[in-house]
Image (spheres, rainbow, N blue to C red):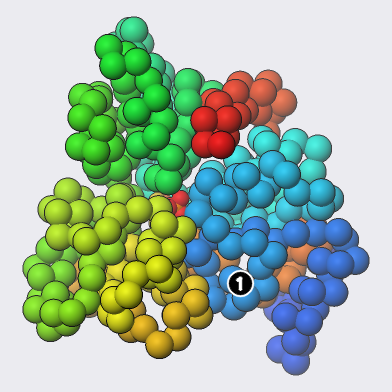
Amino acid sequence: MQYSVLKEKGWLEKEVDANLDLFTEIRKLKKEKNAIILAHYYQDSDIQDCADYIGDSLGLSQEAAKTNAAIIVFAGVHFMAETAKILSPSKKVLLPDLRAGCSLADSCPSEKFETFIKSHPEHIVISYVNCSAEVKALTDIVVTSSNAEKIVNSLAKNQKIIFAPDKNLGAWISKKTGRNMVLWNGACMVHELFSLGQLIRAKEKNPNALVIAHPECETEILEQADFTGSTTALLNFTIKNKAREFIVVTEAGILHQMQKASPEKTFIPAAPATNCACNDCPHMKLNTLEKLYVCLKYEQPEINMPVELMNRARKPIIKMLELSR
Ligand code: 13P
Ligand code: SF4
């Protein structure tokens, strides 16, 4: 049956026989179709275990730009798959669930951003990769959490800067570089919910633990951190540092690789103010192993954009990749 018909009838999930060994089936399909699975650390651990490459936003875009595979299955969110398609337009780029968006990207609609840019003439536009292709097309240089400091530091001292869409990452970069930037008022729904009270209680309960945080967290949280960095930087810190316990203030999916790399160490996920599971990104977690299998089997849903939009959005991403070397 056609993928579109299955989708319409809501049969997609039912398509997966409960007796199938999805790990084996996915491995077979990957080989048969010359496909590669790129996964972000916030994906479900089963998906991470099927991936050919797991990384932060920078690593994932570098990988998407250089792969020889015919199909890229992006186990992440929509803006990440879009970035992969923009960098490899001749390849088929698939996203297991097209609804996997990003609250931060959604906080910056391109029409409003265009007006904002016009009201700040003479400013260079720096956008965090967590934004739509339309916003990238309005941007001078794209950055990720692992290269934003370096890229902002590379700009002339008198250069006026707009930084979008994450006000928390922007404030952190401002503090690190001493640059006064005009910030777009956007934020990530997951990182904004970490509670200072809960974090202080966790530190009291685990006095030997180091606090490590993603720069999408609010300033009051980052002030408590012993180390702040991108997901890959956080993972590498836990591998290299001699401490035995870490309180991890970012999406809880990253704990899978931390625990795998350092089974003898203890990783404590930081908690939001309530007992919700809000340190799980609801967008990232829309992808499941079943959807990944169906997506590879039917080569759907596919990411596509107008060529002209891709051409405009590619320039600031390429600039970022060049400045990150
Ligand atoms: P990283 O680039 O650090 O992996 O961050 C991506 C992201 O979406 C964090 O919420
Ligand atoms: Fe977007 Fe936040 Fe989810 Fe990252 S964790 S994908 S920034 S909503």
Q: Residues within 10 Å of mark 1 (few under 14, many from 20)?
A: many
Nearer-the-camera pick, 36 or 300: 36
Question: As drawn, is 304 to the left or to the right of 162?
Answer: right
Query: Which quadrant: the C terminus?
Result: top right
Quadrant for ligand 2?
bottom left
- Residue 177: percent from left, percent from top: 26, 32
Q: Quadrant of residue 268?
A: bottom left
Kindly identify the amino acid type of the residue bearing the numbered disc 1.
Answer: Ile
Residue 11 drawn above or below residue 132: below
Residue at (61% x, 72% y) in the render:
47
- Residue 42: percent from left, percent from top: 47, 64
Q: Quadrant of residue 157?
A: top left
Question: As drawn, is 55 to the left or to the right of 297?
Answer: left
**Among all residues in the image, which is located at the extreme top?**
122
Residue 259 drawn above or below residue 217: below
Residue 44 drawn above or below residue 69: below
Question: As drawn, is 67 to the left or to the right of 310?
Answer: right
Q: Quadrant of residue 206?
A: bottom left
Residue 217 drawn above or below residue 297: above
Residue at (31% x, 50% y) in the render:
216
Nearer-the-camera pick, 314 or 285: 314
Nearer-the-camera pick, 214 or 139: 214
Disc 1 residue: CB within 8 Å of ligand 2: no
Query: Which quadrant: the N terminus?
Result: bottom right
Residue at (33% x, 63% y) in the render:
250
Q: Is residue 109 visible?
A: no
Q: Is residue 44 visible?
A: yes
Secondary structure of residue under mark 1:
helix
In this figure, what is the number of numbered marks? Answer: 1
- Residue 315: percent from left, percent from top: 60, 23
Residue that mark 1 sits on: 47
**Among all residues in the image, which is located at the extreme right?**
32
